[in-house]
Image (cartoon, rainbow, N blue to C red):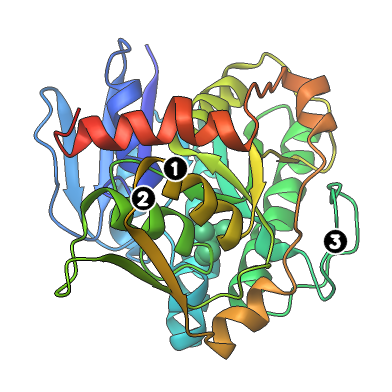
Amino acid sequence: METILITGSNGEIGSQLLSSVKKNNAKIIAFDINKPITNYKNILYIKDTIVNEKIIKKLFNNFAITQVYHFAALLSQSAIKNPQLAKQVNEEGSRLIINSAFDSGMKNGNFVRFFFPSSIAVYGPRKLIKAKEADIIQPTTIYGKNKLVIEQYGAEKHEQSYKLNSGIDFRSIRFPGIISPYTIPNGGTTDFAPQMLHAAATFLSKNNKENYECKIDKSTKLPFIGIHKAVESIIQLMSADDIQSKLRTFNIEEVSLTPNDIIRILQKEFPKFNISYNIEEKLQSVADTWPDSLNCEKAKKEWSFSNKHDKKSFFMEYLIPTVKKYYGRH
Ligand code: AKB
């Protein structure tokens, strides 16, 4: 039986992954800094910080954890606001979890499968088109630097483990912006896309017009993925028997979008919904260093990542029907 640890289990990806894996016959530990937002049966909920070495070590000592999904992190804009905390949580906390998983694998003579969500924030300083995993990687933000350090640390620990025949099996995805029909994110650079979707589906302003103030220029293109495909991909990558890549990280996306693309599609369904622009330099300057699209060939080849959507079907067949259902409009 698998024993699965999910950190950041209240977060956008963590909560969705928890809801998917709880169906499996596995022991699950859901770890978050805030009190649980769900009350699933047979889940051990722990409310603590991932930088609490004592509790993390205790967890790995008390349970023979076989899989780790490590989502606890500060997002890009929150990290810019608090670089010290970002280093502590995104780097030191991640290293602590990786080291503890490594030690546990060594002790039990097995490989603990470890999933780390990296980000397109590792790219920079110039905007790339169809960025490949090994393309120029010089992140300009603290968040991008944190993610890159941990990608590399995880890959090193992975190599070390394979030489020692136990430790961790490290796997990672560089996520583009995630759009969920269930949650409105905060603290990220790509938040405008999900925020627009939710604003269109719910928001009636004072003058009875639906309006969203976008802080990113209308022609800034960024890659995106829906939350369901994001979670499905994590499970697919973690279930693959053997992943050959030495880099250990993969690019995936469903569509590339500008704010202008989004408003044009949303207005077909929500004709009163409108947008105004009030560019915020600290968001724009980050978005300008992130790729406008990703090359996903490596993920397709290594673990059969697939994508059936174009911009129109992504909204019309997936996001809009799901968000409408979520808010009870049919
Ligand atoms: C953010 O904007 O911080 C994230 C990301 C792409 O890493 N959504």
At x 72% / y 37%, what residue is drawn?
A: 161
Q: Which residue is mark 1?
A: 268
Q: Which residue is mark 2?
A: 271
Badge 1 or badge 3: first in the primary sequence = 3
Q: How many marks?
A: 3
Give residue 128's mark: 3
Q: Distance of mark 1 from mark 3, alpha carbons?
A: 30 Å
- Rendered position, 263 above or below 43: below
What secondary structure is found at the residue carrying circle 2? Answer: loop
Q: 169 or 284: nearer the eye?
A: 284
Q: What residue type is disc 2 on?
A: Pro
The C terminus, quarter of image: top left
Q: Is residue 301 left or right of residue 11?
A: right
**Which quadrant of the figure contains the N terminus?**
top left
Above or below 165: residue 220: below
The amino acid at mark 3 is: Leu
Q: Are marks 2 and 3 in contact (CB under 8 Å)?
A: no
Q: Camera-side residue: 207 or 293?
A: 207
- Residue for point 37% across, 66% down: 51
Mark 3, residues whose alpha carbon is within 10 Å: few (<14), some, or many (≥20)? some
Q: Amino acid at mark 1?
A: Lys
- Which one is in front in this view, the residue at disc 1 or the one at disc 3? 1
